Image (cartoon, coloured by chain):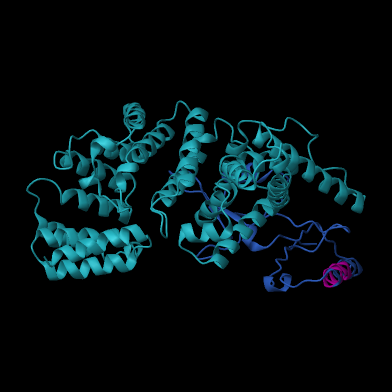
Chain colours: A cyan, B blue
Amino acid sequence: MVTEAVEVTRVVDRAHRESWSTVLSSVVRLTRDLDLAEDCTQDAFVQALRTWPDGIPDNPAGWLTTVARRLALDRLRRETNLRRKLPLLVEQPDEAEQPTDPLRLVFTCCHPALARESQVALTLRLICGLTTREVAAVLLIGEATAAARITRAKKKIAAAGIPYRIPADHELPARMDVVLTVVHLVYTAGYVATGVELTRADLTGRAIELARMLERLMPDEPEPLALLGLLLMTEARGDARVSADGELVLLADQDRSRWDGKLLAEGVSRATSALQRGHGRFALQAAVAGLHVTAPSWEKTDWGQVVRMYDAMMVSWPTPIVALNRVAARSLVPGADLEAVLVELDALSKEPALATYAYLPATRADVLTRLDRPEQAAEAYKQAIHLTANETERRFLTTRLTNLNR
Amino acid sequence: MAQYMFLLFDSEEWYDNLTRDEWQQAMKLHGEFAAAVEKAGARILGGEALERSNTASTVKNREGAEPLVTDGPFIETREALGGFYVIEARDLDQALELAKLCPSGNIEVRPVMPTTEDAAPPA
């Protein structure tokens, strides 16, 4: 049966979104060579576009994996025959799919001997299947820079012998933090996408999937559990974040009945059990998210408790962004001393790490509006509009700026 | 006889546009050096070519804290090179574990470059 070209493209796109890392990681297990594995995975998708019009296989991911692995084996045999030197350096053809394959590849991408910026770029490329151009757009860097980071990381993996495996149980606690951080960054990159769309569901979805895998891998550790809870609670609010006409709606103004109750309940229960077992940074972040989603309204949120969570975070994780979130929460405690808040915000604006961070001037603008200083508030809004990379956010801030003058 | 360690420092840009012939030529020069050492009645006890410095990892062993693994070579500040080991290990993970046991404050872990006859010039 011949299938419509549009339908084939749709199915191949979907397989790319859902199964890229499964196919790729299965090929990596065979070749131990990232470039070769990537080429063969790419070629398998090209073959799918060519042959699926004659009939779409029942199990697209399985089909792609088989084809990609066969292409890889062919190429390895050809190269070995050409050189006639080394025996095949690969494992014998084994089970095509192992459920833990994507996780192995995650631990390779997030190896502590790679720079953080390379870990993130490589994860977006290999695990999320983004093109180099998309990686550049998500990370707000030039395409050449993104390409250089990915190439350099792959070279290091090959030359330095970074293994392709899930660390042993005793190594996991030391390796966990980097992986959780990178998964969180992938989620954040998808949540505040650059360009026209407010979110990239493929990235947020993949990050949640990875968090679920990590939770299953380390059931006794509170932090993977906390990360999953945090992501689920954030995801549950996703739909309410955009209005019917595509505008950004702040947490304060969101219609809480539009939150996804099932995701929320799942997130809250995970956050709660994580908090009973530890107060790592993801547990504290999940606690803040939990305080938001269980409050009946923005005004009735327990802001004092939110500030205390950020206080605790400042002890173990004193980053400028945590400091900014803490001050922003402080400004919302009923009867807050807004002048004092403003002083703290001004101090933070000297932080180089926040120099291009739109939330800082946006928060200042809000505080200045409440202090009834519209001219200064307008300046701050303009600064935030200039800094944001997201079109929907820009429109939102512009509306705020316009409303000041009314 | 006394023993001496030679540390070879060169610009890595040389690798950027390296042809197979130039690589062979460089190998030949090292062969000639080895012959000159023998001829002088001295001996080479060991030696390896190293992969580029951007394939290096550095382990910082800190008192009272977990060892810190970072990407890249050791950037010398007050410390001076005080010794070396050539270790054969399963993979980088094992090498890094062993570096954490090594009685030194900072250990740069650099992969050794294959220089056998059929090895390709480094990428």
| Residue A113 in sight in this render | no
Please provide percent x and percent y for residue A318.
32, 51
Magenta stretch: give its range: B22-32
- The image shows a total of numbered marks equal to 0
**Vertical arrangement, residue B122 with respect to residue A294, above or below:** below
User: Is residue A112 located in the magenta-colored stretch of the structure?
Assistant: no
**Which residue is found at the position 23% from the left and 49% from the top?**
A326
**Vertical arrangement, residue B48 with respect to residue A81, above or below:** below
**Vertical arrangement, residue A26 with respect to residue A153, above or below:** above
**Which residue is found at the position 78% from the left and 59% from the top?**
B47
Question: On the picture, is A351 further left or further right than A333?
Answer: right
Question: On the picture, is B100 further left or further right than A357?
Answer: right
Please provide percent x and percent y for residue B23.
82, 69
User: Is residue B24 located in the magenta-colored stretch of the structure?
Assistant: yes
Quadrant housing the N terminus of chain A: top right
Predominant secondary structure in magenta?
helix
Please provide percent x and percent y for residue A151.
63, 59
Q: Which quadrant of the structure image shows residue A118? A: bottom right
Question: On the picture, is A348 further left or further right than B95?
Answer: left
Quadrant housing the C terminus of chain A: bottom left
